[in-house]
């Protein structure tokens, strides 16, 4: 299965939530995490950014060999592999880039283990194609008028399975209002608190995921039909 996680506005916590979803699938059946933004090595506490990744694969165009994806993947922890962003600098015209993104989505969709895509703000043709071709997509949204406004203008919102709402104190909007405006269910709510930030800053998300973040990731995965195996989480 291929699940894309994206947001209409940057700074919504998409990368952290995508990583949490991949980790929530462990220890079985395992997972692959695709990084379209370049933030996952830092989120996962890795020592550095891999030099080669999916950006290099996409730069080859829609005829890029699918078996090369396995060679690009790096081990994060037992049962989980990261397809890093890489440093590809090739430039394709928009139709070719979109076709390459669709080819990538098909290759990942047919894999034995589920793939979670951190699509960030899908502004490129390749990223949009991944969202469109995926089996399911989820939108990560803060309770923010600008984020909601951007979501209503995105043609990708109609394809989403649901919303993951980041709950922040003092916001005027509620998750119910966001659900009503977009016509999509809220499948998970992530409470914004210092524990998540400390966990990511310390590089220990893979071993000490905050319990409420794990619960939200589990709820989101179940909403798209992915079964969850037991996994430890910090208090």
Image (cartoon, rainbow, N blue to C red):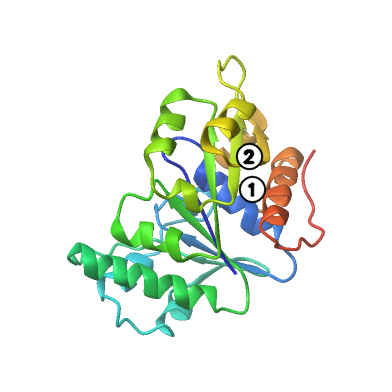
x then y, percent, for residue 149: 41, 30
| Position of residue 215 in the picture relative to residue 123 (left or right) | right
Q: Is residue 122 left or right of residue 178?
A: left
Q: Quadrant of residue 92?
A: bottom left
Q: How many marks?
A: 2
The residue closer to the viewer here, 127 or 33, is: 127
- At 64% from the left edge and 54% from the top edge, which residue is drawn? 21
Residue drawn at (37%, 62%) of the image: 129
Category of crowding for the residue at label 1, using alpha-carbon neighbours closer than 10 angstroms: few (below 14), some (14–19), many (at least 20) = many
State the mark number for residue 199.
2
Quadrant for the N terminus, please: bottom right
Residue 193: x percent and y percent?
A: 64, 27
Q: Is residue 25 above or below residue 74?
A: above
Q: Quadrant of residue 97?
A: bottom left
Q: Which mark is residue 205?
A: 1
- Residue 82's disc is none
């Amino acid at each position: 299965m291929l699940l894309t996680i994206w947001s209409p506005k940057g700074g919504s916590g998409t990368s952290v939530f995508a990583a949490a979803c991949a980790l929530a699938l462990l220890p079985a059946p395992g997972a692959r995490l695709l990084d379209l933004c370049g933030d996952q090595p830092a989120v996962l506490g890795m020592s550095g950014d891999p030099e080669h990744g999916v950006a290099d694969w996409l730069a080859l165009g829609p005829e890029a060999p699918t078996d090369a994806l396995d060679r690009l993947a790096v081990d994060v922890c037992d049962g989980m592999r990261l397809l890093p962003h890489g440093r590809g600098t090739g430039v394709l015209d928009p139709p070719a880039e979109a076709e390459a993104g669709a080819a990538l989505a098909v290759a990942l969709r047919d894999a034995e283990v589920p793939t979670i895509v951190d699509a960030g703000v899908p502004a490129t043709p390749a990223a949009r194609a991944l969202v469109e071709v995926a089996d399911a997509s989820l939108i990560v949204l803060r309770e923010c008028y600008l984020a909601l406004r951007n979501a209503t203008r995105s043609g990708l919102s109609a394809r989403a399975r649901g919303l993951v709402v980041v709950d922040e104190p003092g916001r005027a909007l509620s998750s119910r209002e966001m659900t009503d405006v977009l016509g999509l269910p809220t499948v998970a709510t992530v409470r914004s608190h210092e524990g998540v930030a400390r966990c990511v800053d310390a590089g220990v998300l893979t071993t000490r995921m905050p319990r409420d973040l794990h619960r939200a990731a589990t709820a989101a995965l179940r909403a798209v039909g992915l079964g969850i195996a037991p996994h430890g989480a910090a208090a």
